[in-house]
Amino acid sequence: MQQLIYDPVKSDKVMTIVCFISGSGTNYREIAARNPNHNYLVFTNRPGCAGLAIAKENKHEVIVLSHIFYLKEARRKYGAGKVPRNCPERVQYEQEIARLIENKLGREPDLVCLAGFDQWNTDWLVDRYYPRMINVHPGDTTKGYIGLHWMPSAQAIIAGESSIRSTLFIADKSEDNGPPLVQSKPLNIAETLTGLEAQGEKGLTAAFKRISGFIASRSIKNYNDFRQQADEEMQKAMGNICVRLQDALKVKGDWEIYPFAIHELIAHGRVAVDGRQVFIDGKQMPVWGYRLDENI
C-alpha cells in the first residue's frame, strides 16, 4: 500500500524539517535557501562545526549532542573505527537524539535530512523515521558507486563511465544507501576536468588519460586492484582528480537534487513509498528514481 512521505493536506503545507549536520552545513544551507518558509531545526554531533554559523544566520534552532561520550566505551570495547553500526551504544545515542528533537518539536519531524552527518544510522533510527529520513550520496548508488569521500568517483572512472551522478535516497537499514528518490543530471568527467584546467588546475586531463589507459591495459575491475597495481604517483593523481570531480558534483548534483526533492516533490505530497518502491505522482519510479535530465 502506498504511503505518502508527507501529506500537505493533513499538515497545512508547512513541513517541520530536521537537518543533521556535522561539518560545513552546505547541504542544509541549500535546502533552507530554496524555501525558508518551512520550520527548520538543526541537529549536530559536532559542537564547533561550521554549519552552526549558517543556522545562526538563518535564526534556526539548534540541538547539539556530541557522540563522543556515548561511543567512548564502545571504542574501547571494539577498537577505534570498528564500532558496529547497531551496537547498543549507538542506539542509546540515537534514542537521546530523538528524545531531544521530539521534545523540542512536541512531535516527530515531518522529514529528517542527513545533510553531511558523519555518524552511522542504526536500524532503530530507520525504524522510527522510515520513509521520512533522506540522504544524498555523490555517486550512482544503483551501480554500486558508494563509499566514503571521493571513492564513488574513483569507482566510476574504473568502470569506464564518461559521467557521474549524485543520488538522493530514502535511508533504510543498508549502509549509506536506500531506495533512490532523485538522481542529478550527469556531470561529464572529461568536460569537467577540461573546465577546471581552464581555471588554472593544470595537468588534470593528462593525468586522467594516463589513469584511464592504465586501467584499460591492466583490465582493472575495482579500486582494490587499482591500488595494488598503481604506483604512488598514480594513486595520488587519482585522488586529486576525484576530489575535484566530487567538489564539482556537490555543486551541480547534491545542491540541486536535495532542495528539489524536498520542495518540489515531497512538500507537495508527490512522493509515496510502498516498501522499497518509490512512486511520484502515482507513477512507479525506475530503479534509479527520478532523474532531473529525464523528467524535468
Image (cartoon, rainbow, N blue to C red):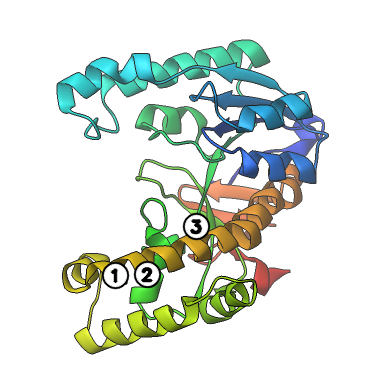
Amino acid carrying mark 3 in the image: Pro
User: Label 2 belongs to which residue?
Assistant: 237
Residue 138: mark: 3
Q: Looking at the image, can residue 73 be seen?
A: yes
Say above or below: 209 vs 83: below
Provide the secondary structure element on which disc 1 rests.
helix
Say above or below: 177 vs 76: below
Q: Looking at the image, can residue 106 be seen?
A: no
User: Label 1 belongs to which residue?
Assistant: 233
Amino acid carrying mark 1 in the image: Glu
Task: Count residues near mark 2 (Cα–Cα under 10 Å), then give few for <14, some for 14-19, many for 20+.
Answer: some
The picture quadrant where one finds residue 206 is: bottom left
Provide the secondary structure element on which disc 2 rests.
helix
Mark nearer the viewer, 1 or 3: 1
| Cβ atoms under marks 2 and 1 closer than 8 Å | yes
Q: Earlier in the sequence, mark 3 or mark 2?
A: 3
- Residue drawn at x 52%, y 45% is 135
- Residue drawn at x 35%, y 21% is 91
- Residue drawn at x 60%, y 10% is 103
| Cβ atoms under marks 3 and 2 closer than 8 Å | no
Q: Give left or right: position of 51 versus 77.
A: right
Amino acid carrying mark 2 in the image: Ala
Task: Count residues near mark 1 (Cα–Cα under 10 Å), then give few for <14, some for 14-19, many for 20+.
Answer: few
Say above or below: 175 vs 293: above
